[in-house]
Image (cartoon, grey):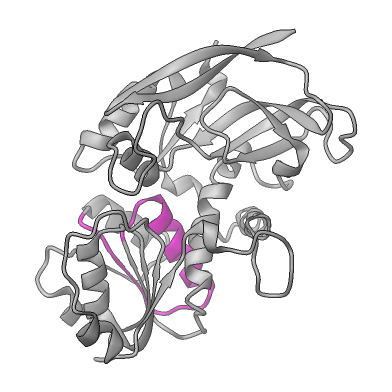
């Protein structure tokens, strides 16, 4: 037997559609069939691919989406860890109404965490990695550059790690205001004068101890290098796709002993090994515990919840608007 599955497709440059396909509805051995509730849009990565920027997939069609929540409909032979009705997250699976996936790729959602919040678990795992790689100690200062979804999570995680002050930087007044509501201590605009001098004023003249660079832009990395203290650390969380700003590495990195740390999620430990080697599943578990305890705020980051039928419109806004929504969620329950 088959079922009709809906999914979001990038068909070409700035061209988005909601498509349907017939797929089998019976999981094979070791597989699980999941019906989606929500999938969170990772605007930076997805829009970069929609625009075919350098260091993206580079061809079409391309299927966006990698952070979803849903419920188990059926399990295949040999599956013992899941049963129908279980609430799960589905990483790396696209914006889809249904998934057939190996049971090993699913993660159970903790009690106390609702489906909407859970749909951000995989996206939030990235800034967990970006902050962990900085080895933040209680009392150290942290700056986050770029306050989209990843930046909003990174600033909260830095604060939870004991950083003070937490300084954020973004061109958007709305995003700066949101960061302050979520607990950041200071919010700066790169457009308002010499941001490095302002950071030094906020850190006793030395610069910030650690920085999470989320935008992936060379000009933002240059700004980070101007703001960081000697012997400071910068984690490159945002995908550094375009190298369009020359950087004097001798003056800003080599001579000052600054550490640049790659923080792409593919750089993390793949399997459980030893203390301190955090896997994606470890960070999912941390995300669930913090959300359930009310220490990590997801809901304030959610700007809009829309039907997947509006995919073309919402991606158009994400690409074209000067101040696009921060957290967009596709609600698959709205499809008839």
* The C terminus: image quadrant: top right
Residue at position x 26%, y 36% from top?
319
Q: Residue furthest front?
A: 59
Say which quadrant the N terminus sits in. Answer: top right
Per the image, is 128 magenta? no
Q: For the point 51% across and 22% down, which residue is it?
A: 7
Left or right: 136 as drawn, with respect to 206: right
- Out of 224 and 322, give the one closest to the viewer: 224
Q: Position of residue 115 (x, y in %)?
A: 62, 37
Number of labels in the image equals 0
Depicted 190 relative to depicted 6: above or below: below
Is residue 29 visible in the rendered image? The answer is: yes
Residue 168 inside the magenta-drawn segment:
yes
Residue 114 vertical placement versus 37 (above, below): below
Q: Residue at x 53, y 74 (%)?
A: 161
**x, y percentage for residue 266?**
53, 57
Residue 201 in view: no
Q: Magenta stretch: give its range.
A: 146-171
Q: Is residue 14 above or below residue 43?
A: above
**Image location (x, y in percent) of residue 109:** 70, 44
Examine the image and state in which quarter residue 249 appears.
bottom left
On the image, the x and y values in percent for residue 328 come to 41, 37
Q: Residue at x 41, y 62 (%)?
A: 237
State the residue lying farthest toward the left.
193
Task: Residue 327: name its quadrant.
Answer: top left
């Amino acid at each position: 037997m088959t079922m009709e599955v809906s999914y979001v497709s990038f068909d070409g440059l700035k061209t988005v559609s909601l498509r349907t396909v017939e797929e089998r509805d019976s999981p094979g051995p070791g597989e699980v069939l999941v019906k989606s509730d929500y999938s969170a849009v990772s605007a930076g990565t997805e829009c970069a691919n929609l625009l075919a920027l350098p260091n993206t997939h580079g061809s079409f069609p391309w299927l966006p989406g990698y952070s979803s929540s849903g419920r188990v409909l059926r399990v295949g032979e040999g599956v013992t860890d899941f049963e129908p009705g279980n609430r799960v997250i589905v990483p790396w699976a696209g914006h889809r109404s249904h998934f057939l996936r190996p049971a090993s790729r699913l993660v159970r959602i903790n009690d106390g965490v609702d489906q909407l919040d859970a749909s951000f678990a995989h996206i939030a795992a990235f800034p967990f990695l970006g902050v962990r790689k900085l080895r933040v100690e209680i009392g150290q200062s942290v700056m986050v550059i770029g306050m989209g979804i990843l930046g909003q999570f990174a600033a909260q995680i830095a604060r939870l790690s004991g950083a003070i002050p937490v300084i954020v930087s973004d061109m958007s007044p709305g995003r700066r205001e949101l960061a302050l509501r979520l607990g950041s201590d200071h919010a700066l605009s790169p457009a308002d004068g010499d941001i490095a001098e302002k950071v030094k004023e906020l850190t006793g003249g030395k610069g910030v101890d650690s920085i999470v660079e989320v935008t992936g832009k060379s000009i933002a990395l240059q700004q980070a290098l101007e703001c960081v203290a000697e012997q400071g650390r910068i984690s490159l969380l945002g995908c550094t796709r375009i190298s369009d700003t020359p950087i004097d590495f001798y003056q800003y990195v080599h001579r000052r002993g600054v550490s640049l740390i790659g923080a792409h999620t593919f750089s993390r430990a793949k399997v459980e090994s030893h203390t301190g080697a955090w896997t994606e599943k470890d960070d999912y578990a941390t995300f669930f515990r913090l959300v359930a305890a009310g220490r990590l705020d997801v809901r304030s980051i959610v700007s809009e919840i829309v039907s997947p039928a509006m995919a073309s419109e919402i991606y158009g806004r994400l690409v074209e608007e000067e101040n696009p929504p921060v957290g967009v969620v596709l609600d698959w329950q709205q499809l008839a």
